[in-house]
Amino acid sequence: MPRLMLTDKRWQKLLQVMKSTGRIYNKPEHRMTFEGILYRLRTGIPWRDLPTEFGGWNTIYRRFNLWSKKGLLNNLFNELAKLADYDWVFADGSIVKAHQHSTGAATSDNECIGKSRGGNSTKIHLAVDSGGLPIYFELSEGQRNDIARAQSLVDHLQEVNVFVGDKGYDSDALREYIEARGGISVIPKRNYGQDIDKESVDWCLYKYRHLVENAFARIKHYRSISTRYEKLARNYASMVSLAFSMMWLPMYC
């Protein structure tokens, strides 16, 4: 078995979760289709260049697009993330360069692709649990500030205990919102020239914020994540969900 292909045990776990959604049937060809999607995730090659061992490229792409429409890959990530530990939650955003082929979607929406001097980009807003495993994410245009999606990240947490973020989340309104949900915020304040009480932040806990940075580093090993090639935000989100699912899979088998 090639090094990067799924073991039988891991495939059975993924198939079990996907079947539980009621949105796919147990077809033998699903395994090689899934392997083809994973290959595309790792390499970022055009769909037309997929090796024929996985099947017809058009079949694999149409199946991926269908699963994306059904939200199957997002559901897969959400189901695997149910083991999350919510004692500490770390949040951050990371900008992804959007390839020229990702622009020009035949929709009226910007598909979460922002334009700036640096070119086209998309931002991934992410929350990870105490072990650094992903819990929830959203996409936005690359130029959006982290604070723009902070409240939404909090809203989608099953529990709000301790929320840790960098200075990009410096907002009294956000701190009050977290406290209203029964949580504690560990967010340093920006220095605007006034005296800052440095003792007001748990710096020991703040040092563990590298866990969310590590999560970004891991998924950006996948070429289809580190550079966005998908025209539709829905399809790119499905690719990100698949990458996060691969982070969770070793926790099960």
Image: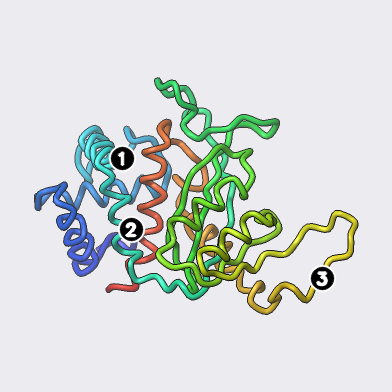
Q: Secondary structure at mark 2?
A: helix
Q: Which residue is mark 2?
A: 78
Q: Which residue is mark 3?
A: 197
Q: Where in the figure is residue 209, as x and y percent of width and height?
A: 61, 68
> How many marks do you count on the picture?
3
Residue type pointed to by label 1: Leu
Q: Is residue 97 left or right of residue 233?
A: right
Q: Residues within 10 Å of mark 2 (few under 14, many from 20)?
A: some
Query: Which-is-in-front pick, marks 1 and 2?
Result: 2
Q: Is residue 69 left or right of residue 120?
A: left
Check whether the beta carbons of the residues at disc 1 and disc 3 lie within 8 A of each other: no
Query: Which-is-in-front pick, marks 1 and 3?
Result: 3
Mark closest to the chain's N terminus, 3 or 2: 2
Alpha-carbon span between mark 1 and mark 3: 56 Å
Look at 35% across and 64% down and name the residue there. Answer: 81
Q: Is residue 209 left or right of residue 84?
A: right
Q: Quadrant of the N terminus?
A: bottom left
The disc placed on residue 50 is 1
Mark closest to the chain's N terminus, 1 or 2: 1
